[in-house]
Image: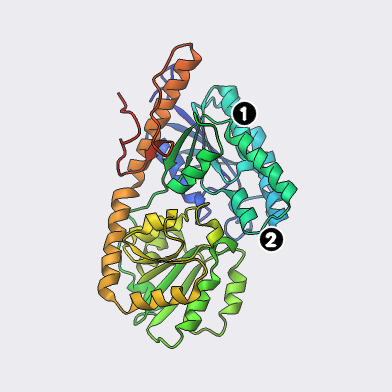
């Protein structure tokens, strides 16, 4: 794709999380920006200083001033913001609001100086997305909002926020913001369905998957060194790796560890950081079968995931169709079985079908029993692991997903320019569930028109 004057196309990406944050949405924001640079785009990323999931400042960065840097070809602007030590509901609102306020002048300035062809905003933080819609309007760019997490729905369903008047105001703000965008997307079909209900019928809504690093994360990696360091050579490792917060419901893992203490062959490894970590460490103090690890560097993640015999993916029922855990892609790529907590018919259930077992959220006895069942059945673990790897290879490849996203950018930018110049452009077909394009590897041409 080239701009009308023959120059390289320009992408303005705005998202609160960016590397060197180690987990979560940071990975997808950073890798999206870098992929587009590698494919001929100029990219400006407006983001925040790294802080997640420890909610603490990292060396070399400031929460009090703007900073600029260039990372892997991407021009990055870091906006100051408030980061609470203990992120309660009201403090989270202040946190997100501060980023929205400080990023707003950056995206408006970029609209004038950078002149993007596409403005791509990622929620969280939805508060900041309105500024990107304004920037796109000023520059005439295509505006696209990708919803990684229905943060308002999650906060109210989990009781993090409770005020009914606040909820009504927040939902009005959400609808207003979503309807300012040319295109919207989410990483799973249930999330796409919910997103579609929040906007008008003619809004372009797509499924944009997260992806797996299927080349760097694979089941052939030798994890014996890590197992030896942790003294787990003769153990079956049950691994949770990622953010440790309210919506995960991680206490179910400790309950399973308690119920299965008599099994000398099992070790539960919890690797990560977040607001719930201190509580988890305290509650597992007398559980000899539980090992806690800090967040691992990116380069050690493939070995960590390969060290597992069974992955666990707990999620509270209230959040199961409002987020699609980003850690799932790495779990599948590692070629290991997964035990997840979710209802049948949920987005998580659809994603792990054939690659593991599902138990109802909050059912601690069933969760422990399923771990025990897989521990006792190596052929079943191997079958689920092989299926997980196949899912990762066929549905979660980064290059194919981002190439499809670029193609949709190109089509929608061309349509927007044609309409703005007074011409008529062919309609972008809508999928039966109102997803304008299934931006994934499988059936990648089912919904979207050809590039010709």
> Residue at 62% across / 73% down in the picture?
279
Secondary structure under badge 2? loop
Q: Residue 85 carries which label?
A: 2
* Quadrant showing the N terminus: top left
Does residue 142 appear in the picture of this structure?
yes
Q: Give the class, few, some or many, for how many residues have Cα within 10 Å of label 1's Cα (few <14, many ≥20).
A: some
Depicted 65 relative to depicted 390: above or below: above
> Residue at 36% across / 46% down in the picture?
398
Point out residue 118 in the picture as x, y percentages from the top left corner.
Answer: 49, 29
Query: Does the residue at mark 1 contact the one at mark 2 (Cβ under 8 Å)?
Result: no
Where residue 276 sits, quadrant-wise, is bottom right
Residue identifier under label 1? 134
- Could you say which is closer to the camera, residue 354 or residue 22? 354
Depicted 89 relative to depicted 289: above or below: above
- Could you say which is closer to the camera, residue 256 or residue 361? 361
* Quadrant showing the C terminus: top left
As measured in the structure, the alpha-carbon distance from the residue carrying label 1 to the one carrying label 2 is: 32 Å
Between marks 1 and 2 in the image, the one whose residue lies nearer the viewer: 1
Where residue 405 sits, quadrant-wise, is top left
User: Is 91 on the left or on the right of 283, as rendered?
Assistant: right
- Could you say which is closer to the camera, residue 140 or residue 259? 259
Count of picture labels: 2
């Amino acid at each position: 794709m080239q701009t009308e004057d023959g120059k390289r196309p320009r992408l303005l990406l705005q998202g609160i999380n960016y590397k060197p944050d180690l987990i979560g949405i940071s990975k997808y924001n950073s890798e999206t920006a870098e992929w587009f640079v590698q494919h001929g785009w100029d990219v400006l990323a407006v983001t925040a200083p790294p802080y997640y999931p420890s909610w603490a400042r990292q060396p070399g960065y400031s929460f009090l001033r703007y900073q600029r840097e260039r990372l892997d070809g991407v021009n990055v602007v870091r906006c100051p913001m408030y980061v609470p030590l203990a992120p309660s509901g009201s403090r989270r609102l202040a946190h997100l609001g501060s980023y929205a306020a400080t990023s707003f002048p950056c995206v408006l300035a970029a609209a004038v100086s950078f002149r993007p062809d596409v403005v791509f905003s990622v929620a969280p933080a939805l508060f900041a997305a309105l500024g990107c819609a304004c920037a796109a309007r000023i520059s005439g760019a295509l505006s696209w909002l990708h919803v990684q997490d229905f943060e308002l729905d999650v906060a109210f369903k989990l009781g993090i926020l409770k005020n009914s008047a606040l909820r009504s105001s927040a939902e009005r703000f959400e609808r207003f913001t979503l309807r300012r965008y040319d295109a919207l997307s989410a990483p799973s079909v249930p999330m796409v369905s919910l997103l579609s209900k929040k906007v008008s019928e003619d809004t372009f809504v797509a499924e944009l998957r997260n992806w797996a690093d299927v080349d760097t994360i694979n089941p052939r990696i030798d994890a014996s060194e890590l197992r030896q360091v942790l003294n787990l050579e003769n153990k079956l490792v049950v691994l949770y790796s990622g953010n440790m917060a309210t919506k995960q419901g991680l206490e179910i893992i400790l309950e399973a560890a308690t119920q299965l203490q008599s099994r000398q062959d099992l070790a539960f490894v919890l690797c990560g950081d977040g607001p719930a970590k201190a509580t988890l460490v305290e509650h597992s103090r007398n559980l000899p079968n539980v090992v806690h690890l800090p967040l691992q560097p990116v380069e050690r993640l493939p070995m960590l995931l390969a060290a597992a015999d069974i992955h666990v993916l707990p999620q509270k029922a209230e959040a199961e169709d409002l987020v699609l855990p980003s850690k799932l892609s790495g779990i599948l790529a590692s070629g290991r079985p997964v035990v997840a907590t979710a209802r049948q018919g949920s987005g998580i259930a659809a994603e792990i079908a054939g690659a593991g077992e599902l138990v109802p959220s909050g059912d601690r006895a069933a969760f422990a029993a399923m771990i025990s069942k897989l521990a006792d059945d190596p052929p079943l673990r191997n079958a689920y692991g092989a299926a997980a790897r196949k899912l990762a290879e066929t549905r979660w490849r980064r290059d194919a997903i981002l190439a499809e996203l670029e193609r949709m950018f190109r089509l929608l930018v061309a349509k927007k320019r044609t309409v703005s110049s007074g011409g008529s452009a062919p309609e972008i077909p809508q999928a039966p569930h109102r997803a304008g394009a299934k931006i994934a590897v499988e059936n990648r041409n089912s919904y979207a028109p050809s590039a010709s």
